[in-house]
Image (cartoon, rainbow, N blue to C red):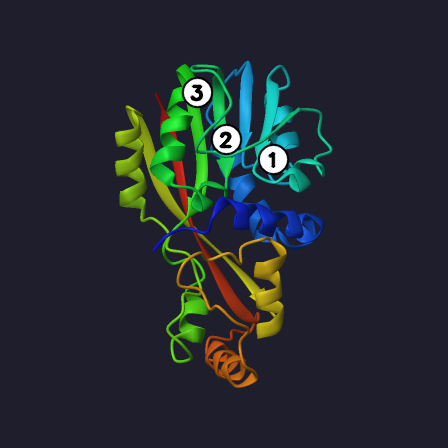
Amino acid sequence: MTKPSKARIRQSFERAAPTYDGAAHIQRRICQQLAASLPALAPARLLDAGCGTGYALPLLQSRFPAAQALAFDLSAGMLQRIAAPCWRLAGDLEHLPLADASLDLYWSSLAVQWCDLPAALREARRVLRAGGHLALASLGPETFHELRHAFAGVDSFRHTLPFHTPQEVARMAGEAGFSQFAVHRGREVAHYADFKSLLRAVKAVGANQLGDGRRPSLMSRAAFQLAETACETRRTPSGLPLTYDVIFLSAQP
């Protein structure tokens, strides 16, 4: 199964730009965890790869005030919402418009799951200087398993993206040329009052593009009700859960 096209991903995040900050609570927590895991560094130049609306930039700039910050995203609409002072670049993480060995820190929180990960990691390795550092958070295969459960008895279409396991991420980091790396796994769970709110939240952060195998037409009311009923079997006292299976990668060239 293939990932969504870059054009569809860009379109989805352009649409989500106005709603992203109001819906990205889990994304913020993951970003904070990634920042807390950073070792002692003194980067002269850092990249926020897949920066979105720029939430991580103040965290990074307060930690590394002397560093030149580059904000990079596929969506120009996301870049326009960044308030922090930085250089803004729009483009593809698989083809960075940066010179070899031009960065000291490559940071990316919840962006590379939309990419061909081996290609993105090769680019990260290419642009990092000797002694540089990569700090990355992506999503693992248990992400949104509640949606797979909800639709399992409804249709055979794909309702979530296929995500890499920690073992696959570690292998790809080594193949990309990183000689030192560590992978660990975390879990974050959001809760929603009802099924409609859960689906709206997924759309509000732009995570509703699925590529090949997705449903080609609107869901019928009967299909929606079946999925809703199945999702309700997972209800907790906090609401309907939606899991983010988080893969953290720390690496050096």
Which residue matches tag 3? 127
Which residue matches tag 2? 107
Spot occupied by residue 192 in the image (x, y as percentages of width and height):
59, 68
Quadrant of the image for the N terminus? bottom left
User: Few, some or many C-alpha atoms within 10 Å of disc 2 (few <14, some 14-19, many ≥20)?
Assistant: many
**SS under mark 1:** helix
| Residue 102 as seen in the image, left or right of residue 170 | right
Residue 56, disc: 1
Residue 126, disc: none
Instruction: Check contact, mark 1 vs mark 2: CB within 8 A.
Output: yes
Corner quadrant of residue 47: top right
| Nearer to us: label 1 or label 3 | 3
Q: Nearer the viewer, residue 75 or 186?
A: 75
Q: Nearer the viewer, residue 32 or 247?
A: 247
Seen in the picture, residue 202 relative to 90 is either above or below; the reply is: below
Spot occupied by residue 159 in the image (x, y as percentages of width and height):
44, 65
